[in-house]
Amino acid sequence: MRRSRRRGGSGDSLTRVSDFSAARQILIASNRGPVSFSRGDDGHLSVRRGGGGMVSGLSVVASRADLLWVCAALSDADRAAARLAPGGMLGLDGTSGGSDVQMLDIPAATFHRAYNTVANSVLWFVHHMLYDTPNHPQFGLAFRRDWEAYREYNQAFASAIATSRAADGKIRALIQDYHLALAPRMLAGRSPGTLIAHFSHTPWAPVDYFRLLPDDIAAEVLDGILGADHAGFLSRRWADAFIDCCEHVLGARVDRDARTVTHRGHVTGVGVHPLGVDAAELTRRGAEPDVEARMARLREQVGDRKLIVRVDRTELSKNIVRGLAAYRELLLRYPQWRGKVTMLALAYPSRHDLPEYREYAASVQRLASAIDDEFGSPDWDPILLRANDDYPRSLAGYRLADVLLVNPIRDGMNLVAKEGPILSDGRCALVLSREAGAADELGCEAILVNPFDVAGTAAALHEALTMPQDERARRCRSLAAIAGAHAPADWFADQLAALDAGPGGAG
Amino acid sequence: MRRSRRRGGSGDSLTRVSDFSAARQILIASNRGPVSFSRGDDGHLSVRRGGGGMVSGLSVVASRADLLWVCAALSDADRAAARLAPGGMLGLDGTSGGSDVQMLDIPAATFHRAYNTVANSVLWFVHHMLYDTPNHPQFGLAFRRDWEAYREYNQAFASAIATSRAADGKIRALIQDYHLALAPRMLAGRSPGTLIAHFSHTPWAPVDYFRLLPDDIAAEVLDGILGADHAGFLSRRWADAFIDCCEHVLGARVDRDARTVTHRGHVTGVGVHPLGVDAAELTRRGAEPDVEARMARLREQVGDRKLIVRVDRTELSKNIVRGLAAYRELLLRYPQWRGKVTMLALAYPSRHDLPEYREYAASVQRLASAIDDEFGSPDWDPILLRANDDYPRSLAGYRLADVLLVNPIRDGMNLVAKEGPILSDGRCALVLSREAGAADELGCEAILVNPFDVAGTAAALHEALTMPQDERARRCRSLAAIAGAHAPADWFADQLAALDAGPGGAG
């Protein structure tokens, strides 16, 4: 879900970031940056703030600290803007010639192979365990060419960081996510004095699944991240899985107590840094008139029925089809809910250039229609499925939800599970997949489900719908309090502290 | 692949079995028994020896020891035969009223749900990691009904064992495979004096994949096997994965050094018992005239080209499509082999009542045709794909193979990898998936491959084809020697010894 955020809140940790940044300059490297461009019908480039949970989180920090953000041009418009700006340098607001953002003009074909084919169709699939294994993946000669592009893409980032204006001084480079698994090692080779962190926003695959990758490539990915001084994860589970892979796939020496991995004579600390929500900012945004307008419209459609809400990108890992199937089983097994409940399913477009995703979006549509045909009446639409991007509508959904359903197959964190309770004002019960990183923190007050267990998810929805008002309110308050911890600025400061403390020192 | 075997060889260990059987009677329980029936056009029931590697192995033992083999009627003809025999009792040759085999007349609908839906479409898929996870499995209400059938099916076995003629004395019950995961616990409850072993002929899923199962069912499967005194596996890897699941899914107390699991006050020993081939018997069978005839025919087709052979059921886990894709990449990347090599792909029918299997068989056909179209010439058929059952042809393939390709995604053991070198007479190089249990033993002399790495498999085929004759002969002899260890009778005696020694005592 794309969104824009204003900045605010969390003054203390931002001070900490500023303190740190006085000592060493900070570089962030991520595929998607804080701005993107589009070209209008008149050929003019217009700028907008970048989307996605990670970008939103980092943008808060970027606005306060003296840092340089290195990102890729994602589109032809981005590439045009990057070429117009000297050295690809932009301001945080997208102005050419600024000093906040360096947008890398990576050739479109290289970018496509690195981003769509390797990062999103292979590494993402491995870490989320999404493959139809009898048929996919097939790592043939074509994949070797794609891997070469992934290397070039990573090398472009490593070069940009190593030759940045700050590289003559001491810098800390915070390299983000599975797109950039090789960059830490490449950077360490070129710029030995740099403190390097890598952060994985995804889950990490268990050993038996990680081994799907060709052996040399599996080793290259692990070795790439181990070029960093600190490797961060959103959940203890993912950090442990990474350490398992380092030991059993790479043969590195690991210390599970100190959480360090020693490889090629270098020690990498492994840290757990959960990411939360800036509650003050979200609450402020959720009270704006565009959200109120969507609430009014939604109240009209739902009436006095109970409202189950889900908000996801239409991503294979988000498990929208089984969520709809569970709703169907709710209506079958607990017929008292027929006509008394509505599901609002906000399923935003995602990765439509991958055929699996187009097919999945079609499956979502089909099942929603089938449920509508099976149970709907002139007075009642059991499902409101909406596929067009509308951030204020998502916030309106959070505010009105009686039940928030978040049931991913596997998810690094999942911020929807945290945003919902913050906005719902004591009204919302959370049904949450235990396979989301967020379950570590929210599991005590959520109703946890096995995402493959459709019957179990239906039972959890029934339990959530029938939860007494006082228990619901108590749990929701507690969920909101937990969700507001580790706001982006704190999360970022936490990583910097761990990086500065060195392996085994923090995190 | 179905086959019949004669008995012979391994006299020592059979003596050991007889010794054991003097102390306590032995009961084997498995889905498929040593005999099956078919009904001719005239309505008459005719008998044949059962097929499959496990059945062949156990049949050798059954013929020598005083034991009772409890199995399910698999077809309408089997059910008719079971009903005609008093108590379903048959001789090992299928004669009614014998005392060797008890064939259970489980209702067809119950059998179908337990066997096709639960055992083969769920437990098999979980242990072999075969799911297309974004879409399957969906454990809804229908699955709960199927699971009830699986319980009934297991209960039928437990009841038959508990009330068998031997149950008044002390017996040892050896319960086989994923079809019968619940029977050990059910039997332990009914028949406390019985020594119970369970043996898994499949891999065991890693924790993160085993957790796909609904929580209560995952726990029931583990608890079911832990009703046994001894749980056996074909490879250390599968035994370790089982122990991991007992600890992390069930919360049982495990001792990895002693290889025991303590649950509900009962200690289960976990053992590794690899299964090998009766080399003398296989060699004898491989020299019979029907095999020689197929060899002559094959020599005509192949001429003086190098011959790559694969022999599998058309099973999703066997990875036939990627094997063909690797052969295609061999011809692309090493064009010197065009016209100089033939692949004989024996892909026998399997589970055609499951739609995924029919689709998979079609994919195999399509890719083989595509390769034939791309590379074939009037003088050269690059692939000979054969889908009709023909055991002597398989043996002829083993005898003539220059390279044997065994590349399963995941496999409990894989006996093809062991049979081939025994019959090949020093001629054959083995390209073997490291994800097969057989890689534990054969890995030192085989060329190991990552089964998902098509380019790597193509390179391994090239390496195998170009291996010098003396190295090939040395390795093949060594492979044959290893493959002949743990012949079925030894394998069985080993399990009995571990069962009698008690937890931590052996295995």
Image (tube, coloured by chain):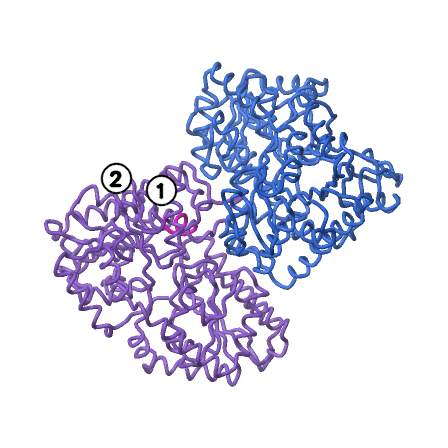
Chain colours: A purple, B blue
Q: Earlier in the sequence, mark 2 or mark 1?
A: 1
Can you say which quadrant of the picture contains the N terminus of chain A?
Answer: bottom left
- What x and y, as percent, mark residue B404? 55, 26
On whether residue A440 falls in the magenta region, the answer is: no
Chain letter of the residue beneath label 2 in the structure image: A
CA distance for labels 2 and 1: 30 Å
- What x and y, as percent, mark residue B285? 70, 21
A14 to the left or right of A314 = left
Judging by the rendered image, the residue that carries numbered circle 2 is A265
Q: Name the magenta segment's main secondary structure.
A: helix
- What x and y, as percent, mark residue A108? 29, 49
Residue type pointed to by label 1: Asp
Chain letter of the residue beneath label 1 in the structure image: A
- For disc 2, the neighbor class at 10 Å (few under 14, some 14 to 19, many from 20) is few
Image quadrant where residue A7 sits: bottom left
Residue situated furthest left in the rendering: A168
Residue depicted at 48% across the width and 64% down the height: A433
Does the image show residue B361?
A: no
Does the image show residue B401?
A: yes
Q: Nearer the viewer, residue A309 or B236?
A: B236
Residue type pointed to by label 2: Gly
Q: Quick check: do tags 2 and 1 share a chain?
A: yes
Please determine whether, in this image, residue B104 is positioned above or below residue B264.
above
B223 to the left or right of A485 = right
Secondary structure at numbered mark 1: helix
Can you say which quadrant of the picture contains the C terminus of chain A?
Answer: bottom left
Instruction: Name the mark nearer the viewer: 2 or 1.
Output: 2
A338 to the left or right of A170 = right
Disc number for residue A146? 1
Which residue range is magenta in the image?
Answer: A119-125
Secondary structure at numbered mark 2: loop
- For disc 1, the neighbor class at 10 Å (few under 14, some 14 to 19, many from 20) is many
